[in-house]
Image (cartoon, helix red, strand yellow):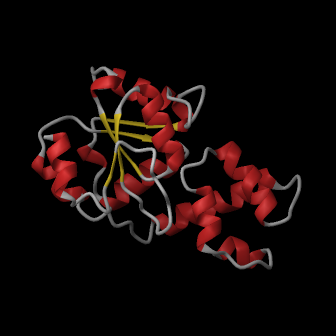
Amino acid sequence: VVLFQRHGETFTLEHKREMIGTSVTESTAILERQLDAPGRGPELMDELHELVMDEALRGVEPMPGAVELLDALSIPFGVASNSPRPFVERVLEVSGLRDRFAVVLSADDVARPKPAPDLYVELARALGADAGACVALEDSPTGVAAARAAGAFVIGVPSLEGVVLDEADLVAESLADPRVLARLA
């Protein structure tokens, strides 16, 4: 919201839906277009990164059902995010969930970000598993595509109203949906 206001524009949910799950390279191009600022993408991305890092310090609530799901299972969990590592680490720390994940990977850790399967293939390897035997919880079409390409069973859990995850193997309204626990148990 602040970034768009600074540049004389109004931020909408459609803007957010378009950016969710995208890589930094894609987000940069999207921001340039959304703010009608050709060639200023890297500068806009730096500004956005600073804003979201500051915003994260104000608190991050885990998705509904996340803590209960982690508590109910005794399997290793990992994070595979298209966001830059500093942001992923900050959000996990502020939410109190960092210690709950055996492995945390960001787009900084692989050659090709989502929708390429690299993050999920590397995460499975780091967890000592085959990607085809893993279950991925995803909130974006980009993430669903990446997890499917890696061979994982994908549970789509939208974190933003209006995000369509039809390509997931199972779509749940929240992590508290009993089908999510049943698939992971």
Image coords of residue 166 (percent x, y): 45, 50
Residue 74 in which image quadrant: top left
Front residue (pair 147, 39): 147
- Work out whether residue 16 can be spotted: yes
Quarter that holds the N terminus: bottom right
Q: Name the residue at 66% across, 61% down.
A: 48
- Work out whether residue 82 can be spotted: no
Image coords of residue 16 (percent x, y): 59, 65
Q: Name the residue at 88% across, 52% down.
A: 39
Front residue (pair 50, 139): 139
In the visual, does 69 lie left or right of 136?
left
In the visual, does 57 lie left or right of 126?
right
Quarter that holds the C terminus: top left
Image coords of residue 30 (percent x, y): 73, 55
Image coords of residue 179 (percent x, y): 19, 51
Q: Name the residue at 63% across, 75% down.
A: 12
Give the vertical position of 111 relative to 13 (above or below).
above
Q: Name the residue at 62% across, 68% down.
A: 14
Front residue (pair 142, 82): 142
Front residue (pair 77, 164): 164
In the visual, does 124 lie left or right of 148?
left
In the visual, does 172 lie left or right of 8?
left
